[in-house]
Image (cartoon, helix red, strand yellow):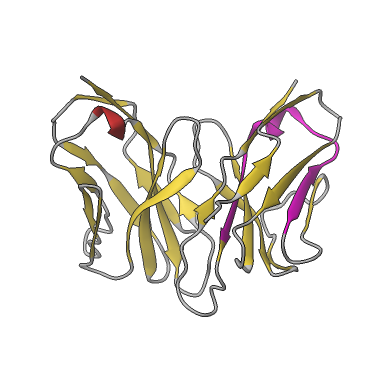
Amino acid sequence: GDSVTQMEGPVTLSEEAFLTINCTYTATGYPSLFWYVQYPGEGLQLLLKATKADDKGSNKGFEATYRKETTSFHLEKGSVQVSDSAVYFCALRLFGNEKLTFGTGTRLTIIP
Amino acid sequence: EAGVAQSPRYKIIEKRQSVAFWCNPISGHATLYWYQQILGQGPKLLIQFQNNGVVDDSQLPKDRFSAERLKGVDSTLKIQPAKLEDSAVYLCASSLDPRLAVQTQYFGPGTRLLVL
């Protein structure tokens, strides 16, 4: 079945470090790919998305590129801040189906 | 614009008791989703409504879980009787009519359930 595998956490980085959170997927169709973020005490928020191969999603300094050849959608940020501390979820959605399939989440902690 | 509202935020019950969660989606959103998020896992879809009709309930444990969206707006998710393994965060999400275009799902803060 369709699934998402993401880098296990927790991940701890110093402020201004470079961030990569790996995400790979398995899907029978042509999925759209998403990164959601969950800040402490809050609900899931869409961070960025990409709907077809080679698309790059970006928001708040975060980027991810839809790589069909490697079935990946890795999340990157050049310089993290303490306020980026949260849990990050990679997810996919198949064309014609609204159901989101999530990875297990990666907890990110940024220390000053 | 108000977001997705859920209540209660926290609930503690004993096994075999019943519990109900409430969700009010963003105004005008036709589609409503309930997800279950067990600690250490990603959210898993339980049920999807399009207006007041069920689109997908394939992963809803129907022997103990039920959900309704009678007027196509608010929704209630019920568990009866609860088991220990139902301890999780229950997330409600909503989106505009997906039949029109690919839509973003907006999530509420969730209800954290602990079954003792």
Observer-nearest residue: A80 or B40? A80
Q: Is residue A62 above or below residue B57?
A: above
Residue A100 in the image, given as x and y percentages of width and height: 50, 57
Q: Where, quadrant-wise, is the C terminus of chain B in this rendering?
A: top right
Quadrant of the rendered image containing residue A28: bottom left
Return the residue found at the far bottom.
B100
Residue B53 in the image, given as x and y percentages of width and height: 74, 70
Quadrant of the rendered image containing residue A94: bottom left
Residue plotted at (53% across, 73% down): B98
Quadrant of the rendered image containing residue A73: bottom left
Position of A52 with respect to B60 (left or right) is left
Return the residue found at the far front.
B1
Residue plotted at (73% across, 56% down): B74
Position of B39 with respect to A11 (left or right) is right
Position of B90 with respect to A76 (left or right) is right
Residue B26 in the image, given as x and y percentages of width and height: 59, 58
Position of B3 with respect to B54 (left or right) is left
Residue A77 sits inside the magenta stretch: no
Q: Is residue A18 above or below residue B32?
A: above
Residue plotted at (20% across, 40% down): A20
Residue B92 sits inside the magenta stretch: yes
What residue span does the magenta drawing correspond to?
Answer: B74-94
Q: How many marks?
A: 0
Residue plotted at (79% across, 66% down): B71
Residue A90 in the image, given as x and y percentages of width and height: 38, 49
